[in-house]
Amino acid sequence: MPGKNEGMSDFPKKLVGGAQIVLGGAFVVQGLRALGLYGCPTTLGRAAAQPREDWPDSHQRGTIRTVRTVRVPEENIGERISLIIDSIRRDSLEPTAREIASTLLSGRRVGRNGRIEWAVPPKDHLAEIRAVFNGIRDPANPFALRYTGDHAEVDQFASTRVNTKLNIADCDDMTIVTGSVLRAVGYPVRVRVVAADSNDWSHVYLKVGIPPVEPTRWIALDLSEDNPAGWELENADEAKRTGRPSGRVYRVKDYDV
């Protein structure tokens, strides 16, 4: 969302005013719907809310337990992304993230020599990242995420625990889940936000650094698209490097977690 110094010309003028957040098992933000053209079509055109734990123990799907309601003005994109970053940081310390990582990384298989070995070789960073990425999108896993848009008129956020119970998420929630799981096993992550096909912020996804200490390479992880780990919209890195539009990409910003 535009900051005070960016001007309304940088963002749809229809997105003005405040947003109402309902805090509880999941967050619901009341705002106006904007049309995006890539990735996560309605998410970044609406106001944001910070996720909070927890879903009620009874886990009545479709029920949101409200705690309190607050007013949040529509601020710049940095403040929006900071809510996603806070969720990744918090959720990476919760048991759910570590449990998902354990399920995806601790599988065993019979090796060529007939001995039992780890299916994902220890310290093989690319193999670990791909295992997490592919596992979260694999419907065979109980915590898998199906890309699903938010409510028609409100933007919804939830924690890693809630998202993986519901098994549905849009691009911001997928970023939260993947980021928290990878961070829980030692990987530095970034959140990348992209304005594609127009000058309006329309999509967000994760980038993970390897090696984990002093990374020299950052790999895109976009679960909202049917593409392998490492894929992202062409020209995104070029637009980030130059600060100018490149191809379909108008603007790119990266935020360290």
Image: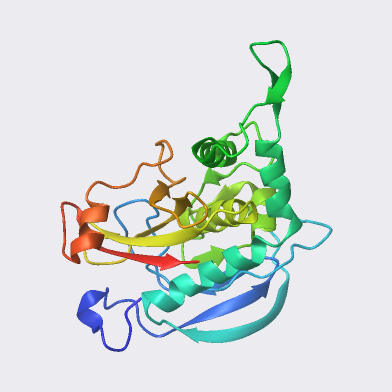
Residue 178 x/y as whole percent: 55, 51
> Residue lying furthest right in this view?
58
Residue 221 x/y as whole percent: 44, 47
Residue 153 x/y as whole percent: 46, 66
User: In this view of the protein, can residue 234 be seen by the observer?
Assistant: yes
If the image is split into quadrants, where does the N terminus sit?
Answer: bottom left
Q: Residue at x 52, y 58 (%)?
A: 188
Q: Is residue 60 above or below residue 228?
A: below
The foreground one among 123 and 209 is 123
The foreground one among 31 and 137 is 137
Residue 121 x/y as whole percent: 61, 31
Is 236 left, or right, of 16 in this rendering? left
User: In this view of the protein, can residue 250 be seen by the observer?
Assistant: no
Q: Is residue 85 above or below residue 237?
A: below
Q: Residue at x 23, y 61 (%)?
A: 241
Q: Residue at x 67, y 11 (%)?
A: 113
Q: Residue at x 21, y 59 (%)?
A: 239
